[in-house]
Image (tube, helix red, strand yellow):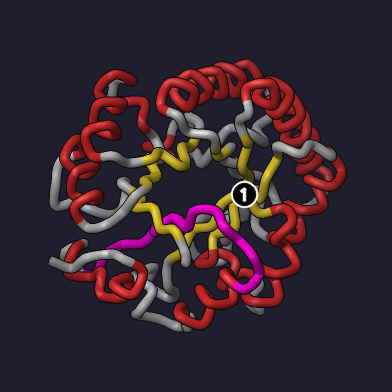
Amino acid sequence: MPRFAANLAMMFNEHDYPHRFAAAAAAGFKGVESLFPYAESIEDTKTWLSVSELELVLINMPAGDWTNGERGLTCLPGRQGEYRDAIAKAIEYALALGCCNIHSVAGLAPEPGPERMPYEDTFRENLSWAVEQMAPLDLNLMIEPINGKRDVPGMFLQTTAQARDIMAELGKPNLRLQFDVYHVQIMEGDLVHRFEDCLPDIGHVQIANPPDRREPDEGEINYPYLFDAIDTAGYDGWIGCEYFPRAGTREGLGWGTAYGLKTE
């Protein structure tokens, strides 16, 4: 049976951040994603996780100046020092909070051509450095293809094929694919076969339903079929619910009652 984690950046926004942990636990979640936990102290976050008996399954590394449009540091030439500082901060939080997965957000880059080459080189350089720091600590570095058609035009990493080519080139076992079904559907489709093909490289899964990034029961993807296919393929990791609830978070969990989630 799938194991679902609530994304606390998108879900349970009816509550202020410290109370989202308890709200997620009350709704039946056993795990959570906290994309940018750095505004809160490690000790506070540790307490919220412990009291709610939740596992923190994914964090993002600090991703640059998000407010002013940056979408990650990993590919940005000339920012390697800042990238290393961001990875060090993420490692500090991950180790203290018992989280084994860190997403290295790719960043924005030019379209393919001569101007793009420094971004390609920097992306590989930064990933190679980061996974070497993380391997002795039993931490995984995630890379996530994010669609450039709709949500983030100019994103460096946009398809699973691109991600897997880089992973194969670098050959680092703790460099893993973050398979976000929403983004993969928009960019590539053929979800079941693509998931099965990517499975050896997948370290984490996220879900939302196009076209509006809503609950799994509203949109173009047949999620009950896909969840069965994911189970059959043998994936036993976490599935992060990274969607925007159409109304109240709890009221929209009807899709998950078959998997132990609660609407009341």
Q: Which residues are magenta?
A: 232-246
Residue behind mark 1: 203
Majority SS type along the magenta span: loop
Write the residue at 77% across / 40% down.
Answer: 120
Q: Amino acid at mark 1?
A: Gly
Write the residue at 62% across / 22% down.
Answer: 137
Residue 256: name its quadrant: bottom left
Q: Residue 247, relative to residue 173: is it above or below?
A: below
The C terminus - image quarter: bottom left
Q: In the depicted view, which residue is nearer to us: 30 or 14?
A: 30
Q: Dot 1 surroundings within 10 Å: few (below 14), some, or many (20 or more)?
A: many
Residue 51 shown left or right of residue 128 in the figure: left
Q: Position of residue 107 (x, y in %)?
A: 59, 41
Judged from the image, the secondary structure of the residue bearing numbered disc 1 is strand
Q: Position of residue 85 (x, y in %)?
A: 55, 17
Write the residue at 45% across / 29% down.
Answer: 98
Residue 81 shown left or right of residue 250 in the figure: right
Residue 51: name its quadrant: top left
Q: Is residue 193 magenta?
A: no
Q: Position of residue 53 (x, y in %)?
A: 28, 39
